[in-house]
Image (cartoon, grey):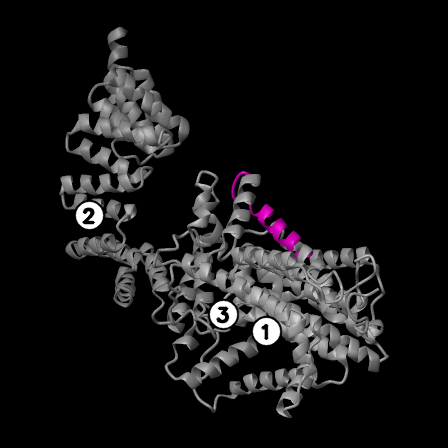
Amino acid sequence: NLSLDSDYSPYWDHHIPLPKLGPVHSRLVTAFVALICFINGYDGDFVFDDSEAIINNKDLNPDTPLSNIWKNDFWGSNLSSNSSHKSYRPLTVLTFRINYLLAGGLHPIGFHVLNVALHCVISVLMIDVFAILIGGLVHDGRGVKLNLSPKASFLAALFFAAHPVHTESVAGIVGRADLLCALFFQLSFLVYCKAFQGGDKKFSVLWIFSSILLCAVAMLCKEQGITVLGVNAAFDILMVCNLNIYELAHRLLSRRKSADVSDLFTGGLLMRLALLFLGGSFLLYARWRIMGTGPPSFTEVDNPASFAENVILRIVNYNYYYSLNAWLLLCPWWLCFDWSMGCVPLIKSATDWRIVWPLLLWCCLMGLVYQALCSQDSNKRRTLTFGLVLLVIPFLPASNLFFRVGFVIAERVLYLSSAGYCLILAYAVGYCSCHWKKHKVLATLTLLCVNVARSAQRSQHWRSEQSLFTSAVSVCPLNAKVHYNVGKNLADRGNQSAAIKYYREAVRLHPKYVHAMNNLGNILKERNELKEAEELLSSAVHIQPDFAAAWMNLGIVQNSLKKLDEAEQSYRNAIRFRKKYPDCYYNLGRLYADLNRSIDALNAWRNATILKPDHSLAWNNMVILLDNTGNLAQAELIGKEALKILPKDHTIMFSLANVLGKQEKYKESEGFFLNALKINPNVASCHGNLAVLYHRWGKLDLAKRHYELSLRLDPSAPGTKENYNMLKRKLEQRQRTVG
């Protein structure tokens, strides 16, 4: 006994050039293919967005209250903040936190392994999803679901497991959001299908509510999860109710009554759609309230087409973006971690040859829609229709149709949509296999092997930022952010000369790229090319007046150029735009010290230590300044206060030891000198000053030993040689006296 018509078995399934495996073996093979595609990235680093979402995200730390993940966005910022991207994914952040807890810290291997495992599970579950969409929701008399398309569903799942466009979601740890969302998307769909297990088109409201609940879980992993309700509704209309859209439209246009429509009303469809609609409306309302009833703010560089004033140009460019997404699914060779900042120049006129691509896309889509609606073959209609449903509906949140998104193209948003493409591709292979007898096995295996090889290669790129950023230069040479990231990676590894080249290219491609200007200005400052550094940093703060870091760096450059009044104003501007800026207070204190404004300097450094209690340089400078101005008692208090916070800071120990020595507290001073030398035994000045202490204390042999150690480490140490000669004369005089 079958719960629905058994007329769903596609004729082309047995033509697919794959062996017919049992359920267990097909799942094992699919999981293995998914594994070999991405396993080579299991020990990769944290790269790109992982820095903000994981390394710098305090919500991952077990010391942070767990409730924070429900108040903050994906990146750890408060949802009410103007800078928040409003991406509310607490369950994804929770899995990151669990990774952190299990590994005892930020070790990327555990994060990567879980991502790969999730992709394997999702690929395996795709067999069940495709089996239903291709072969129908059919059960035997015992309620066991039958797979009437074992080869087709297996092949589509293999295509999904090996698709290279998934690399960003699997190899990039931040892609965990897409993986978890896809997992609960599948579970929501499969649970919705369970609602019809009873046969005779009866349904269970409990299973439908469970499906909506899983949709909510998917949304808490990533916002795209809401689209499963659309897929469920389409499945209900097209498969459960077996609605022939073409026939229905034809009858409505000819004003003839449609038996199909009356069947819809009597089959409980309206009730089920109402439940889906109410559930979806509630979830969207809750999401809107959580977001703060306001969308995130994006800039023109994030999504230039959405800022085009001409509506026609906006529509044309959106469609061009769609065509590029389709091309990534069809030919995933040109993959890039970021597609913004000039990577995809806007189409601005009808003479731009790229306008052909959206036209070609719509021709292909219309052809598929025609085949899905008008074909006489019900299997073909069903497979192509659900392929289009899975392709289009999960992509809608990224389409700019309902709200502006913060990217031009993002490969990660294609993770779910690629399932629809894989379903259509599997049908294409089955159809061709029916009419093309020769070499069909070789062609299918070649297609799979090419995808596996490309996925493995792309996964290798994601192992480190150096390889990831470098791989993007050839794909998006016009993308200023690509050049910026390559430059930043080179600078972090100490290759400043090469970094300058990439930073300059980033600024050339995007003349208002303030972060590239700031970083380039910093490097030029360190190379003492102060005039150009000042020009760049001045331009950066002119373009973005609230760029606090650029204001501080401009102040440092102006200080070096002896433009002290301007430097002070720049530091003040930086603090005005970033209230809690300890490094800026530290630099302002240095400026005041140079101007002999000791009280102002001490206040600035004290502010730095209040904002950042472990700011070693600020503490040390306070001790040194108080020492130099003769405030030895206060210097001692500050030094001891600092060591309570930084008990192993040898520089503060050294400065405090000098202060104590001047107060003739020789024993205490000796202790701090020796502790400092235990931590860092090769500091010539520390040996030299300890020798002076022993010299004054009358422990001449110890003084001699440490003078010699100091001179061995730094023969040109100022004053040490003179003090050593004085000691030798004193020792000779003592020896003569004894003699």
Amino acid on which the number 1 mark rests in the picture: Val
Identify residue for label 1: 392
Lower sequence index among marks 3 and 2: 3
Circle number at residue 506: none
Image quadrant in which you'd find residue 505: bottom left
Residue 99 falls left or right of residue 435: left
| Kind of element beneath mark 3 | loop
Lower sequence index among marks 1 and 2: 1
Identify residue for label 3: 339
Amino acid on which the number 3 mark rests in the picture: Trp
Amino acid on which the number 2 mark rests in the picture: Leu
Circle number at residue 591: 2
Lower sequence index among marks 1 and 3: 3
Residue 709 falls left or right of residue 152: left
Toward the top, the furthest residue is 739
Q: Is residue 648 depicted above or below 178 in this figure? A: above
On the image, the x and y values in percent for residue 384 come to 69, 77
Task: In this rendered view, identify the residue nearer to me: 196 or 38.
Answer: 196
On the image, the x and y values in percent for residue 311 come to 41, 83
Q: Is residue 45 magenta?
A: no
- Look at discs 1 and 3 and give the one toward the viewer: 1
Task: In this rendered view, identify the residue nearer to me: 179 or 251.
Answer: 251
Quarter holding the C terminus is: top left
Say if residue 172 shows up in the picture.
Answer: no
> Which region of the structure is painted magenta?
104-120
- Look at discs 1 and 2 and give the one toward the viewer: 1
Point 42% across, 75% down: residue: 306
On the image, the x and y values in percent for residue 156 come to 73, 68
Task: In this rendered view, identify the residue nearer to me: 599 or 213.
Answer: 213
